[in-house]
Amino acid sequence: MHVYSDGSMKDHVNERSGVEVPARFPAALAGVEAAEKAGVGVEHRPCESAPEDTLTAAHDTGYLRHLEEVSTAGGGVLDPDTALGPGSWAVALLTAGAAVGAVESALSGTTAFAVSRPPGHHAGRRTAMGFCLLNNAAVAAEHARSRGLRRIAILDWDVHHGNGTQDIFYEDAEILYLSAHRSPFYPGTGASYEVGVGSGEGFTVNVPLPARSGEDLYAAAFAGVFLPILREFQPELLIVSAGYDAHAADPLGGMRLETESFGRFAAAVSSLTREIDAPPPAFLLEGGYDLDALSACVATTMIGASEEPPDWNYAVEVSPVEESRSSHAPYWESLR
Ligand SMILES: [Zn+2]
């Protein structure tokens, strides 16, 4: 597995975030080390700053200049949870660059993990939000599109809805966004009836789940919604917004996933890419705020990526998942 990270990723300080702390970076890297000890072959890859043309495919140029100027001027506050420091712009560029690198690895046939911070999935075209500056998954998807791909999927299992990613691709039929998240919860979006608009209708797939959901509900979301839609969509690349704040120990999430749950998620998506003859997944770190759980979950994701898929079936109707299935039945034959 290729791991993309850069030592400077601990240098971004968000003074408005109680939990998105620099210590998350060494904690996530400790997970890489644990995976290595467990037998995962790891090749550390350097990150390069994401190129401007890839950034402008996902973000407004004025927004990019604003981030750069605020950071260069010493920092500032962008939203109630999101602040920049003097080193933040350079780190944000490297984090987006790590996502681009992970796509390149995946397209060359090697599973990759961008072990980086800050996270990205709340950042919109021209908005910083919820600890996020650049939308790393969106930049990664646009990079893949610039390489000629026309069917790209982003699967987001962070406990929060990735409203930024959804917004950026809401009218886009080439980039399928799928998310399971706690609802009602921050940031307030991600209802099952939010399915995309225009030519993008049907290509945004939300499975909102109640507080305290455990792996049984997530398994139903995978087996009843994500996996059938992905089989039908046949992505040429699968990007995973891998957040770990739905872990039972997380101080924000309020869900009940276990460390091993994320290994099974990774096994499910990796085996799906093999089944449909797509490149292996590119995992991008999003949230996850209990440092021990973060380390352990990064490790189980990396280990799980080469394991057999879990035996999940969608046999009985599961109410929160059923709503999402009926919202998407008009667009996906596999759900009818
Ligand atoms: Zn989150």
Image: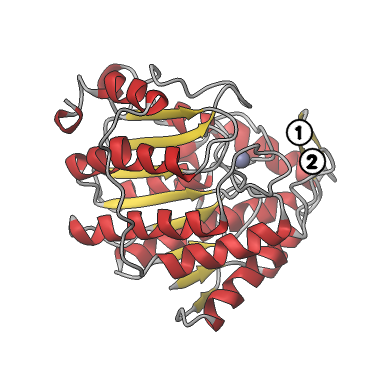
User: Front-most of 164 and 313?
Assistant: 313
Image quarter where ligand 1 lies: top right
- Label 2, secondary structure: give it: loop
Identity of the residue drawn at 55% across and 35% down: 61
Q: Amino acid at mark 2?
A: Ser
SS for tag 1? Answer: loop
Q: Does residue 298 appear left or right of residue 227 in this picture?
A: right
Q: Residue furthest front?
A: 316
Q: Is residue 323 left or right of residue 245?
A: left
- How far is the residue under mark 2 from the one under mark 1? 5 Å
Total number of numbered discs in the rendering: 2
Q: Position of residue 99 (x, y in %)?
A: 49, 56
Disc 1 marks a residue whose amino acid type is: Asp
Is the residue under label 1 in contact with that under label 2 (CB below 8 Å)? yes
Q: Is residue 292 visible?
A: yes
In what quadrant of the picture does the C terminus appear? Answer: top left
- For residue 199, side relative to residue 160 (left or right): left
Residue 154, position as x, y percentages in the image: 39, 43
Residue 170: x percent and y percent? 39, 25
Task: Work out whether residue 63 or residue 245 is closer to the camera in this orientation and state it.
Answer: 245
Badge 1 residue CB within 8 Å of ligand 1: no
In this rendered view, identify the residue nearer to me: 86 or 123: 123
Q: Quadrant of the N terminus?
A: bottom left
Label 2 vs 1, first from the N-terminus: 2
Mark 1, residues whose alpha carbon is within 10 Å: few (<14), some, or many (≥20)?
some
According to the picture, the residue beneath numbered tag 2 turns out to be 17
Label of residue 81 in the image:
1
Label 2 CB less than 8 angstroms from ligand 1: no
Residue at 47%, 45% in the rendered image: 215
